[in-house]
Amino acid sequence: MSLVKAKKHLGQHFLTDKNIAAKIVNGLVHTDKYKQVLEVGPGMGILSDLLLERTDIETHLIDIDVESYHFLNQKYPQLGSRLINGDFLKLNLSEIFKEKYAIIGNFPYNISSQILFKILENRDNVVEMVGMFQKEVAERCASKSGTKDYGILSVLIQAYYDIEYLFSVKPGTFNPPPKVNSGVIRLSRNNVETLPCDEKLFWRTVKAGFNQRRKTLRNSLSGVIPKDKMDTHPFFDKRAEQLSVADFIELTSHLSELTK
């Protein structure tokens, strides 16, 4: 089998360090809650080799790259329909997985946020995610209120998942090496099935607050609630980055009362 050539337009940087690969795969720790795992963007299969050795999970692979798909098809003929040539972002995950499952991958950095939002959309069934991202994206996801990295993804992810920053990875462990450092995080679904507030309004509030993060919420939320309906609640005089996830839930409940 000829090796797959990394394609810049797909953001491919193939991991070459087997020790790092093992640390990523060993990051899947909640297999008592699921049996199926989807690897996104397996490339030439450095993670897949290790995933397929595990007897506690059933591994599925998806790659948008036709060349990678054919390479993996030859390498793992036993996979059959569990190897998919397609776009993860367009995949109807509920058609493939009828039970809880996990997602793992060395993700293309150019679509990191889209991948995380896709996971959030499927949060009812994605129990765990272990993934490699650009280091600053990984840190942003794990950051806490009051820090400059704290933003939309931080709040939305932490509303539904417990997040752990596992370890950092240097560029030299990839071929070709990226121009940035990488970070591996684990998301573990928390016990909150639905937030104790209007979830659509929660998402709107978080996004509006951070889209104008230098303004106070009294100004940045004017598209969510008219200013003349805002009262003296102290959150309105704070900036979005100063509010914790619990604060945003409280604020959303308050907005629901004000807009009745």
Image (cartoon, rainbow, N blue to C red):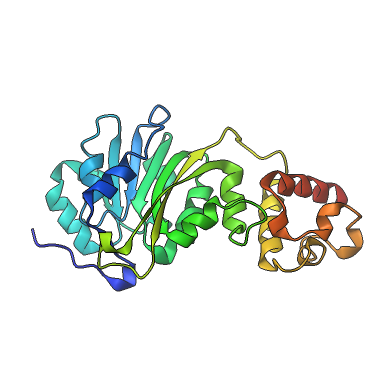
The x and y percentages for residue 45 are 22, 51
Q: Residue furthest left?
A: 1
Q: Who's the residue at 34% across and 51% down the image?
A: 105
- How many marks the image carries: the answer is 0
The residue lying at 30 percent from left, 61 percent from top is: 64
In this picture, is 210 found above or below 25? Answer: below
Q: Report the side of 225 relative to 248 (left or right).
A: right
Residue at 25% in and 34% down: 54
**Outermost residue toward the bottom?**
9
Q: Is 38 in front, or is 171?
A: 171
Q: Which quadrant holds residue 56?
A: top left
Residue 26 position (above or below residue 202): above
Where residue 47 appears, as percent x and y from the top left, is 26, 48
Q: Position of residue 184 (x, y in %)?
A: 40, 51
Q: Residue at x 58, y 32 (%)?
A: 191
Q: In this view, does 216 lie above or below 159?
A: below
User: Which quadrant of the figure has residue 110?
Assistant: bottom left
Q: Toward the viewer: 28 or 123?
A: 28
Give coordinates of residue 229: x percent, y percent: 90, 59
Residue 148 as seen in the image, left or right of residue 97: right
Query: Where 36 sits versus 120, above or below?
Result: above
Looking at the image, which is closer to me, 149 or 132?
Answer: 149
Give the position of the N terminus as an image quadrant. Answer: bottom left
